Image (tube, helix red, strand yellow):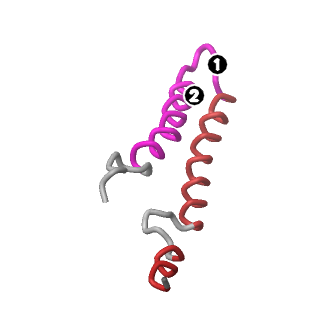
């Protein structure tokens, strides 16, 4: 019984540490807010702020979902 108790109290190896999760969140939120901020410089004659906005916005969602996300091997142990 004590061996079962020890197993349930261990932290899973797939769980992220709080510090690294906060750093990742701050970086991704920074990318997102920078994309929104770039729209302040948008004019009809200058399309580059919109291009920067689209790239930063896409990166702020693509990086966490693909690079930082879970793998597709959820059923494998």
Question: What residue appears at the point 61 percent right and 47 percent down from the top-left corner?
Answer: 30
Locate the C terminus by quadrant. Answer: bottom left
Rendered image: mark on residue 26? none
Q: Residue 19 placed where, x, y %?
A: 58, 67
Q: Is residue 66 left or right of residue 44?
A: left
**Camera-side residue: 73 or 18?**
73
**Camera-side residue: 47 or 17?**
17
Q: Is residue 3 left or right of residue 42?
A: left
Classed neighbour count for the residue bearing mark 1: other residues with Cα under 10 Å, few (<14), some (14–19), many (≥20) = few
Question: What residue appears at the point 49 percent right and 81 percent down from the top-left corner?
Answer: 6
Specify start and end residues of the magenta stretch as a single range. Answer: 41-67
Q: Disc 1 versus disc 2: distance between alpha carbons?
A: 8 Å
Secondary structure of residue under mark 1: loop
Q: In this view, does 73 lie to the left or right of 34?
A: left
Secondary structure of residue under mark 2: helix
The residue under label 2 is 49
Q: Which residue lies furthest to the top in this view?
A: 44
* Relative to 8, residue 68 above or below: above
54 part of magenta stretch: yes
Classed neighbour count for the residue bearing mark 2: other residues with Cα under 10 Å, few (<14), some (14–19), many (≥20) = some
Rendered image: mark on residue 43? 1
Report which quarter residue 24 is drawn in.
Answer: bottom right
**Camera-side residue: 17 or 11?**
11
Q: Residue 26 placed where, x, y %?
A: 61, 54
37 part of magenta stretch: no
Q: Residue 75 placed where, x, y %?
A: 34, 50
Report which quarter residue 65 is drawn in.
Answer: top left
Question: What residue appears at the point 37 percent right and 50 percent down from the top-left corner?
Answer: 74
* Relative to 9, residue 74 above or below: above
Magenta stretch, main secondary structure, is helix
Q: Do the residues labelled 1 and 2 touch (CB within 8 Å)?
A: yes
């Amino acid at each position: 019984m004590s061996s079962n108790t020890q197993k349930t109290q261990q932290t899973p190896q797939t769980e992220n540490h709080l510090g690294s999760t906060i750093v990742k969140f701050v970086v991704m939120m920074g990318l997102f807010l920078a994309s929104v901020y770039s729209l302040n410089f948008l004019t009809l004659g200058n399309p580059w702020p919109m291009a920067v906005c689209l790239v930063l916005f896409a990166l702020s969602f693509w990086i966490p979902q693909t690079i930082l996300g879970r793998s597709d091997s959820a059923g494998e142990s």
